[in-house]
Amino acid sequence: MRATRILLLSLSAALSACAAKKPPPPQSLTLGESKLEYRDYSRVKGSLCDADPRRLGPELQKINEVLEQFVSKTEGASKPEATAEEVELLREGSKSLGPVVDAHGKNLAGLSGCGFKKQAPFPEIAQKGEPLVKQAKARLDEATTVLAAADKRLAETKWREESAAREATAKQTWCSGKVTVGSGDLYFARQEPDGKIRWNFCDGVAVEWSSGSEPAVIVPDSISKKDRKKIQDKRYLEAAKGYPAEEIDKLGAEKKPEAKE
């Protein structure tokens, strides 16, 4: 009877040990065009080294490939000429890739305790994967700052395109008749992100103002010396001063400016 009890206890312990080594369920991830499954084997002690090397190798290799693509394809996201695709991939990765990077880092570290650690392809996986984990973590750490700057650049680019279209419409509306040099007909004003303001007149004259300086009348070279005599600075400066501030075209303005005479 005692022997039977001992046998049952031994079987129970063995079954418990086997159950403890059952690998954690896979997690799914889609990043760009890549789809993969990953496991954090550290959640179940001993499950990494107890895994089938023939299945574990391709699983870890696939994660290496995804991290390599992420690091490579988001390298230019912080640059002024970054593409929308680079920025979007970084944004997507910042939301979903963190747990994968953490799990992969722990899995690679755990390989050193496995009996198959020197079998192909595990030495290559570890050698390639460890720097990729560091690079991916660094990329994710800077993502918030990079994305904020990228969004700002994209918003400014969009505003400049739309502002140019609004200026063209205003010019067509208010300068469609005969243009007389010196008339002081103002049709559009724009404020740059750095605060500089430029008021544009139908005859090509402009008034510019920057912080710390007085407004200045800018006369284009295309206006002849004869016609320059018709230009009275006071008229242009007063027109610029009287232009409604809320209708100056600027980045982030809630109300789109309307052309004014």
Image: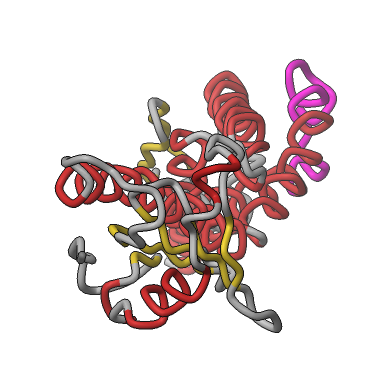
Relative image position of residue 126 (x, y in whole percent): 78, 33
Quadrant of the rendering where the C terminus is positioned: bottom left
Of 76 and 167, the residue lying toward us: 167
Q: Is residue 245 left or right of residue 119?
A: left
Quick one: quadrant of the N terminus?
Answer: bottom left
Q: Residue at x 22, y 46 (%)?
A: 175
Evaluate whether residue 3 shows in this view. no
Q: Position of residue 72 (x, y in %)?
A: 66, 30
**Residue at position x 80%, y 45% in the image:** 113
55 falls in the magenta region: no
Colour scheme used in the picture?
secondary structure
What span is in magenta?
110-125
Left or right for 156, reference 141: left
Q: Is residue 63 left or right of residue 183?
A: right
115 in magenta:
yes
Residue at 55% across, 30% down: 66
On the image, the x and y values in percent for residue 45 come to 61, 58
Residue drawn at x 20%, y 45% as measured from the top left? 169
